[in-house]
Amino acid sequence: MSYPYQIQNREAYEEAYQKSIEHPEKFWGEIAEHFKWEKKWDKVLDWNFSEPKVEWFKGGKLNITENCLDRWAETYPDRNAILWEPNDPAEKIRRFTYKELLDEVCLFSHVLNRNGVKKGDRVCIYMPMVPELAIAVLACARVGAIHSVVFGGFSAQSIADRINDASCNIVITSDGAYRGNKTIPLKSIIDEALLSCDSVQKTIVLTRTGEAVSMLSGRDVWWDDEMKSVRDEGLSHYKPEVMDAEDMLFILYTSGSTGKPKGVVHTCAGYMVWTNYTFVNVFQYKPDQIHFCTADIGWITGHSYILYGPLSAGATSLMFEGIPTWPDAGRFWEIVEKHKVNILYTAPTAIRSLMGFGTEPIIGKDLSSIQVLGSVGEPINAEAWHWYDEHIGKKQAPIVDTWWQTETGGIMISNLAGVTDAKPVFATKPLPGIQPVLVDENGKVIEGNNVSGNLCIKFPWPGMLRTTFGDHERCRLTYFSTYQNLYFTGDGCMRDNDGDYRITGRVDDVLNVSGHRIGTAEVENAINMHTGVVESAVVGYPHDIKGQGIYAFVILSSVHNDEAHMKKDIMQTVSKLIGPIAKPDKIQIVSGLPKTRSGKIMRRILRKVAEGELSNMGDTTTLLDPTVVESIIMGRIP
């Protein structure tokens, strides 16, 4: 097995990139020929960024699961598709060959069908990182339902918001989840969420932790019972639903600069081609390698580089249920040694966290199988890059520093492992098909090298978002209205003398905490729900482990003697309304916020306070009350 479109050397990269820019339709049309189609497309690309409208492989018909499962089950039935490493290292590893995974997906497709799921329905999935999560996702795609996976760390309120926005009619969940030494009661969180979700008719519940849960007659059914019933009836193959190239594949909610999460929509064909192409080329995947992406499938990284990218390439993908520091900080390295992992793709947050334990957890672990290392989720700092290179890759494994977003569907800017040059803290070069531009605040394109600006993309690529679910105008306003005829990423970027790109971080009101995007407005709304809070403002600040921490400035309704208790209450409120990932790292109680006379909060000043840059606050004369700044500086939490 080989990939005819895999780039083998630097010259081939230059050639592919040039062709993709000069003849994009021909370029992507030739790559798409390598997939299984029910009907070929009529037109490769139709687009207009001002609406925005983007359609790839228009008129084409296919089902993504035939490309992820059936074709490999026919040609390589005994190849491992998924290896599963449980939270508890003493628990048994599970393996699914392509044949076995196809069988399970077909069975669960029958289960979905029997529970009323049909093409176009939205299905909310709130599950632990177990193989059944992958099976549920793929079964949705097979029957033509649109999956919306919600990360297991979100609260009942956050889940309800997502279910209601998508009008999901079915939820797939589990009794509970293991995460390190904790158990998370997923079913009871879902039960709370569903109190305000009228659209949900069925809940399918997997047994994972074995804890007692409430099962509502007529609504809740057990996964195992449903699967047994289908097996007993002798149902096996499920004919995949024929989908249009531009039919929705999934909705994935991501934080924006307003309080309401937005449902990013990805479609069947373009997303498939893009995740496959980027997986095969960035990681330089070779048949029979073990690919270990440490992300959760609740995030886009898990969708694209645990499931759809690797499986569409016939790869072996390793899923991990637990966390890198439990039962100790050597867990990742034990997994690498046990499964002989060849490609390790993880987040700078995890790397920095493990750096804090020193090299002792690595001693005695055989990491010689590692051939490629990857970084994802946020810009990686130089210290973490070099530690990763020296201690994990032993300076023998290239590091791919990948920049991309939920909205882009797959990797956009990255070196290709061992093919194009790596450069510490630089994502380096755009992938074929990607045309980045840097613009200033007025939208003027910044030419040349050794420059900085806001990162935009000027031409569509197959994996890009098509809309935000139920609100196309929000999609236009968020991504396509800031700069005319450009997709605005929301990130700042610099281009060095070699033409390599380095992402410098968000330039909008979105935080990147441990690789998870969290809107400042979302956190502020949650804080302001606390009865004792009058107003709040949230900014990011540099955090040694998370990359960015959350610093909240809070005005209370009255003087409280026990501020520490109030801060704990506020944390609990945020955790309840959004989830633990959004809890502020620092809460400073203030008497006022720096506001202009028109009432706008001057976040620039608050960012400087949070970052400790106190010597130059800039012009404060436009503030309604300039003295409030001195008070905030005095009370700053170091």
Image (cartoon, rainbow, N blue to C red):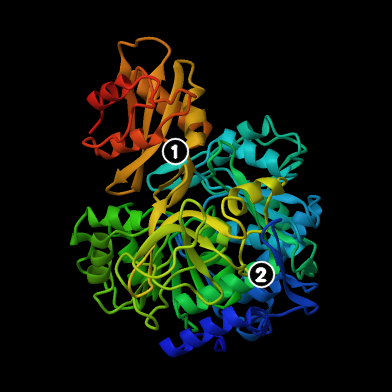
Q: CA distance from mark 2 to mark 1?
A: 32 Å
Query: In this picture, is 621 found above or below 463?
Result: above
Neighbor class of circle 2 (other Cα within 10 Å; few <14, some 14-19, many 20+) is: many
In the image, what residue occupies the spot 43% across and 61% down?
294
Query: In this picture, is 289 found above or below 15?
Result: above
Amino acid at dot 2? Gly
Taking the image as shown, residue 479 lies to the left or right of residue 451, namely: right
In the image, what residue occupies the spot 56% across and 38% down?
258
In the image, what residue occupies the spot 41% across and 86% down?
10
- Residue 255 at x, y = what percent? 54, 44
From the viewer's side, name the closer residue of 190 and 535. Answer: 535
Amino acid at dot 1? Ala
Q: Which residue is mark 2?
A: 270
- Residue 38 at x, y = what percent? 79, 77
The label shown at residue 390 is none
Taking the image as shown, residue 67 lies to the left or right of residue 445, namely: right
The label shown at residue 582 is 1
Give the quarter of the figure containing the C terminus: top left
CB within 8 Å, label 2 to label 1: no
Q: Earlier in the sequence, mark 2 or mark 1?
A: 2
Neighbor class of circle 1 (other Cα within 10 Å; few <14, some 14-19, many 20+) is: many
Q: Quadrant of residue 449?
A: bottom left
- Looking at the image, can residue 489 be seen? yes
- Looking at the image, can residue 377 be seen? no
From the viewer's side, name the closer residue of 107 and 259. Answer: 259
From the viewer's side, name the closer residue of 263 and 454. Answer: 454
Q: Quadrant of residue 487?
A: bottom right
Under circle 1, the secondary element is: helix
Give the quarter of the figure containing the N terminus: bottom right
Under circle 2, the secondary element is: helix
